[in-house]
């Protein structure tokens, strides 16, 4: 056999080997991206649909319903502001409790169901608070205002926390290779929830029989929203079993020896100084000793036990992690906070602005008056505007 023939055979063997390697690698990737795993993520992501559905509802109707109960305009944003501040502390604490939940039903699903029910109850108070209050004290709006404001605050706090739990609920079931797909599905179904909610609010239900059954535009939107959200959430939480979270009781180090500063920065929240024996909790409490990474001892062992972490209270863990937040994460948090501040300030007043300033309506006018009809039409068309920016 000539040298040329030998070279040709070697090339043929190399090509076959490469093809076999490609086939084996693709076969190992197939289970990660199988139709079953993607379908599971799709169904779990449906819970984001319901959460965003409710969030959009109280953003559209929060201010109009308060003004309808004769809450002064100057104070109409105060309940939302206070509820948002409370949610700033409640959300990470509940999220931390969910991380450590060891119930056999799963660690996300119990919180998801409870928060869903509370959000639905809050929106129900927001919708029917005026009628309930007037039935108790006819001609006086004090009880109506209390019920509406209470429902508004409950909906904001629980609705915001529900969005966080939903995201964790989906991401827990996604492998590292499918994290991008999971995030995209959550975003997609959240947008679908906004579009559906604003579409229901934008339809003029006064020309249908539903207005006679439920007794008002807002009530029709609430009833349809509730039925759709309950159905979709049930599909999301029932179709797949969530594996319960089990915590090891052994006193094992959560962090091994850190060999460089970059790794130390990433695990800053889970370290103690083995040389001094000072715990991370003591470092936080002591003044000016929050730094857990010593540049002069980068190669020394810094460990913390899992039992020590779990022994901290949820509030303290939240405080500690916020205190030791890396600079990059802090910049991301600050940008997100400023962006949401501007967005919420816009969307909370948008439907009311359209009803009052563009359609020249009056939210406290008599129900059968032209001014109130114009205001209601402005709120309805403002909902279409919210749907437009979502698309």
Image (spheres, rainbow, N blue to C red):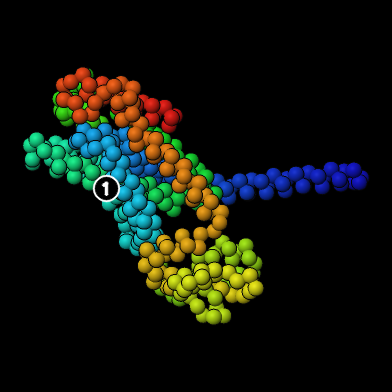
Residue at point 29%, 22% (across, down): 360
Q: In the depicted view, which residue is nearer to us: 203 or 224? A: 203
Q: Which residue is drawn at 18% across and 20% down?
A: 369
Where residue 3 appears, as percent x and y from the top left, is 91, 46
Other-residue count near label 1 (Cα within 10 Å), few / some / many at <14 / 14–19 / ≥20:
many
The answer to which quarter of the image holds residue 273 is bottom right
In the figure, is residue 148 to the left or right of 101?
left
Q: Is residue 36 visible?
A: no
Q: Is mark 1 on a helix, strand or loop?
A: helix
Q: Position of residue 291 (x, y in %)?
A: 54, 68
Q: Mark 1 points at which residue?
A: 154
- Identified at 39% across, 60% down, the residue is 96
Is residue 302 visible in the rendered image? The answer is yes
- Residue appearing at x 56%, y 56% in the figure: 327
Give the number of callouts.
1
Q: In which quarter of the image is the C terminus?
A: top left
Between residue 255 and residue 384, name the one nearer to us.
Answer: 384
Rendered view: 132 above or below 175: above
Tell me residue 331's x, y (percent): 53, 51
**Left or right placement of residue 359 versus residue 249 in this view:** left
Camera-nearest residue between 307 and 282: 282
Direction right: furthest residue: 2
**Image-quadrant location for residue 111:** bottom left
Task: Depth check: give the residue in front, 232 or 353.
Answer: 353
């Amino acid at each position: 056999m000539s040298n040329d023939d030998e070279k040709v055979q070697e090339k043929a063997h190399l090509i076959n080997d490469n093809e076999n390697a490609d086939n084996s690698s693709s076969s190992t990737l197939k289970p990660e991206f199988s139709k079953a795993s993607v379908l599971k993520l799709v169904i779990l992501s449906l819970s984001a649909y319901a959460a965003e559905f409710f969030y959009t509802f109280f953003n559209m109707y929060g201010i109009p319903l308060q003004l309808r109960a004769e809450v002064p305009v100057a104070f109409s944003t105060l309940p939302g502001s206070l509820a948002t501040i409370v949610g700033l502390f409640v959300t990470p604490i509940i999220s931390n409790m969910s991380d450590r939940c060891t119930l056999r039903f799963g660690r996300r699903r119990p919180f998801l169901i409870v928060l869903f029910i509370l959000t639905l109850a809050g929106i129900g108070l927001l919708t029917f608070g005026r009628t309930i209050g007037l039935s108790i004290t006819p001609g006086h709006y004090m009880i109506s205002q209390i019920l509406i404001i209470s429902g508004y605050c409950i909906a904001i706090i629980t609705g915001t926390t529900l969005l966080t739990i939903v995201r964790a609920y989906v991401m827990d079931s996604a492998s590292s290779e499918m994290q991008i797909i999971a995030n995209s599905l959550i975003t997609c179904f959240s947008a679908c929830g906004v579009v559906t909610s604003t579409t229901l609010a934008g339809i003029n239900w006064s020309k249908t029989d539903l207005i006679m059954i439920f007794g008002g535009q807002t009530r029709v939107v609430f009833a349809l929203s509730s039925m759709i959200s309950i159905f979709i959430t049930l599909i999301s939480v029932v179709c797949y079993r969530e594996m319960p979270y089990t915590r090891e009781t052994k006193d094992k180090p959560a962090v091994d020896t850190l060999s460089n500063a970059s790794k130390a920065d990433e695990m800053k929240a889970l370290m103690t100084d083995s040389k001094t024996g000072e715990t991370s909790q003591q470092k936080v409490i002591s003044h000016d000793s929050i730094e857990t990474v010593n540049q002069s001892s980068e190669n020394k062992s810094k460990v913390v036990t899992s039992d020590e972490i779990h022994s901290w209270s949820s509030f303290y863990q939240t405080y500690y992690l916020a205190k030791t937040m890396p600079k990059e994460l802090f910049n991301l948090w600050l940008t997100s906070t400023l962006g949401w501040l501007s967005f919420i300030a816009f969307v909370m007043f948008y439907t009311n602005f359209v009803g009052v300033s563009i359609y020249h309506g009056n939210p406290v006018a008599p129900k059968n008056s032209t001014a109130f009809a114009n205001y209601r039409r402005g709120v309805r068309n403002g909902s279409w505007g919210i749907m437009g920016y979502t698309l």
